[in-house]
Amino acid sequence: MTTFVTGDTHSDPLKRFEKLFGWVEQKGKTPLTKDDVVLIAGDFGVVWGDGTPKDIRIENSILDTLESMPFTTLFIDGNHENFDRLMRFPVESRYCGNVGVLRPSVLHLRQRGHVYSIGGRKIWCFGGGISVDKNYRKEGSSWWSQEEPSDEEYRYGMSQLEKHNWEVDFVVTHAGPSGAVESMKLPPLRESFGGMVNEYDPVSPYLEHVSRKLRFNKWFFGHYHMDISELSSVTADSCVSREEGNFTAIYHYIYELL
Ligand SMILES: [Fe+2]
């Protein structure tokens, strides 16, 4: 079983998956099956909008296409999801945790802070993030308050890591730990919107706190729409293997977990 990780897909998920096919073909790997997994680091973005008949038609078409692909799609949520509808999908127990079932092989890893077991690896997942332009969005149409993790979810994340003795194989989050974000010099999101921002982001400091204690091989995060991989100067001590690239801001690139 192979596990791939990629970043935000909310612009056009199908393009990303076409790229995956091309990449696998190029590397001459064995054909993918539903045992293989593509894990999206938040902002899946397919369940979106007002839920008009047109929105639903587009959503169903994309989900059906993903279902027809020869792999399983998993995603954590980001800040661009319609949480009202996303959380209404039926829930099943898969990968040692709860998942929302959008299609039999398109699954939402809906427990923020849970350690899922995917391909025999422990992966700590923490979705959610802050829309810096939320003051310019309409609640229930282009913004949902559930994007911000609750106190209970923050606490749950800690309790899960405690249970796993603060050691996992990989981490997949939507926002990035503040130390890694600073060390990668990711452009402050406020500049992307010409000053139209809400600058306080409680998720990154929480993740930073976790990253200083947790032992892990690699940490992937989406949200910043950049592909950069490097060692965080701030949090280096927590990495199991102290090499370049323990922290990866991921967007279009598709990584294979080794
Ligand atoms: Fe995004």
Image (spheres, rainbow, N blue to C red):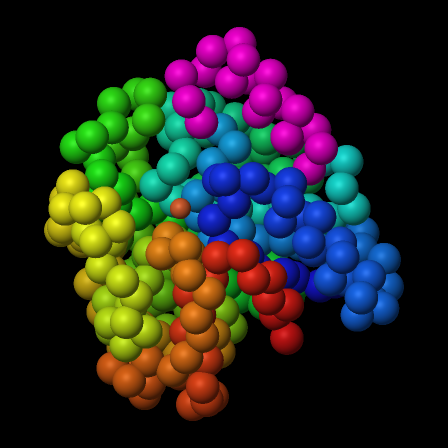
Residue 101 in the image: above or below residue 219: above
Residue 20 in the image: above or below residue 214: above
Task: Find the magenta span and give its range.
Answer: 48-66
**On the image, which quarter does residue 27 sit in?**
bottom right
Residue 134 seen in render? yes
Main SS class of the magenta portion in the image: helix
Q: How many marks?
A: 0
Magenta residue check for 251: no
**On the image, which quarter does residue 119 sit in?**
bottom right
> Which residue is pictured at 47% across the width and 36% down the height?
45
Rendering coords of residue 221 (x, y %): 41, 61
Residue 144 in the image: above or below residue 206: above
Q: Is residue 141 left or right of residue 41?
A: left
Rendering coords of residue 75 (x, y %): 52, 46
> Which residue is pictured at 52% across the width and 26% down the height?
89
Residue 99 seen in render? no
> Which residue is pictured at 80% across the width and 66% down the height?
26
Q: Is residue 37 left or right of residue 133?
A: right
Q: Looking at the rendering, in which quadrant would you find the N terminus?
A: bottom right
